[in-house]
Image (cartoon, rainbow, N blue to C red):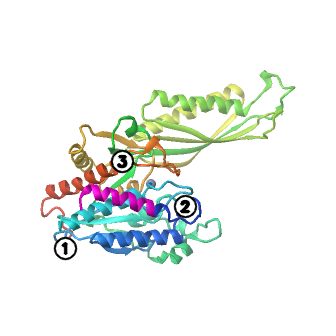
Amino acid sequence: MSTIDLAQVVVERIETLGRISEEPDRLTRTFGSPAMRKANELAGSWMREAGMTVSEDAIGNLIGRYPGEDDRAKTFMLGSHLDTVRDAGKFDGTLGVLAGIACVQQLHQSQTRLPFAIEVVAFADEEGARFQTTYLGSKVLAGRFNEQDLKRFDSRGVSLSEAIRAFGGDPDKLQAARRDPQDLLGYTELHLEQGPVLEKKYQPVGVVTAIAGQTRAKVRFTGQAGHAGTTPLNLRHDALATAAQFITAVEASMRDHPGLMATVGQIEARPGASNVIPGDVVLTLDVRHHLDATRTAACARLQEVAHRSGEQRGVIVDWEVVQETQSVPCSRELSGLLAKAARRHLVEVTELSSGAGHDAAVMGDITPMAMLFVRCKGGISHHPDELVLLEDVRVAIAVLSDFLLLLGNQLSPLSNRKHA
Ligand SMILES: [Zn+2]
């Protein structure tokens, strides 16, 4: 079977998985659901068809293994996730899993073995839609799972621990499911871009340089509520006007610093009446950049702006960092090979950073990691309109396949052996 047919197969499988949902009229496939079980079974059958042995680990990550030339060879992982957000698009996560299976299928059909084993991992929970978590699947595999998460409950009162058991996993064996980094050569994830950069540059795929770090903060403006008809300007302590000044500064900060993403996504003003000056405002701030120093400097500047605006208006500002994640650089070596593979199919290779988080960010903690982004229509994702063109899937599979072959060619026979 040629690469062209495989792209068609991948797109048909994406359509099939897109119909496997826990809700009747839209795609929702959360961790541990019957839809997830069905998706794992189907993907598992495709893995077997591609010459892989199939297993599930303690949290329900589906793992297909294609042996290397040598039993002592290390393992290279290709992966992404099969769970979705609510009312999701079909391509997010699924594309990477199925492209990985397609690459192995190609090797299997040509009876090619590489100097390393390949594992295609379909992570069980990346989006965290059911338990409000992130990257549960890859965290277990990377040995970064937090036991506290087992006590989380979904909206129906089912604990994560119970959900893992019901799915066929074992919450007591999550730590043991950790993979030894010594046995891994690296990890590469193919994923739709979820942004407009590749489309703007007319490029079907692009090589990711880093996954951006992120700061999430909660900012509270405490002023003084008062009568909208009787309080003159010089006696007002308007929390919402102060917040508004801050929000425009957040937006402006992106103009001065290329690559910086800064967003106020949620705001609540109290008491919330048309004839009352707002006395209390809480808003969320989300700041991302692929360089941690740029992100932290931007946050420091914005914090200063908030306090200055507050002082001018007699409004107290409280700044609480809710979450902070460091940026994760992609492996130069693996990214270089991806770019080399891409140059076989494209005149120009675009490099871009990822503003969204991925399982690759967790995997990058234990093994060299790289990502290949695929153009998506209008940059839309986490939405039923999500779309990747067949031609782009074709290029993506070709690049990923060539990447694996290049990696095989450059390995010295001893560098990829596990410890005896
Ligand atoms: Zn995803």
C-alpha span from label 3 to label 1: 32 Å
Q: Which dot marks residue 392?
A: none
Q: Which residue corresponds to mark 2?
A: 28
Mark 2: few/some/many CA within 10 Å (<14, 14-19, 20+): many
Q: Amino acid at mark 1?
A: Asp
Q: Quadrant of residue 264?
A: top right
Local secondary structure at mark 1: loop
**What residue lies at 78% left-to-right and 22% top-to-bottom?**
233
- Closer to us: 282 or 186: 186
Depth-wise, is mark 3 or mark 1 nearer the camera?
3
Report the predominant secondary structure element of the magenta stretch.
helix
Local secondary structure at mark 3: strand
Quarter of the rendered structure image containing ligand 1: bottom left
Residue 133 is inside the magenta segment: no
Q: Is residue 334 left or right of residue 393?
A: left
Residue 288 image offset from top left, x and y in percent: 47, 41
Quadrant of the image containing the N terminus: bottom left
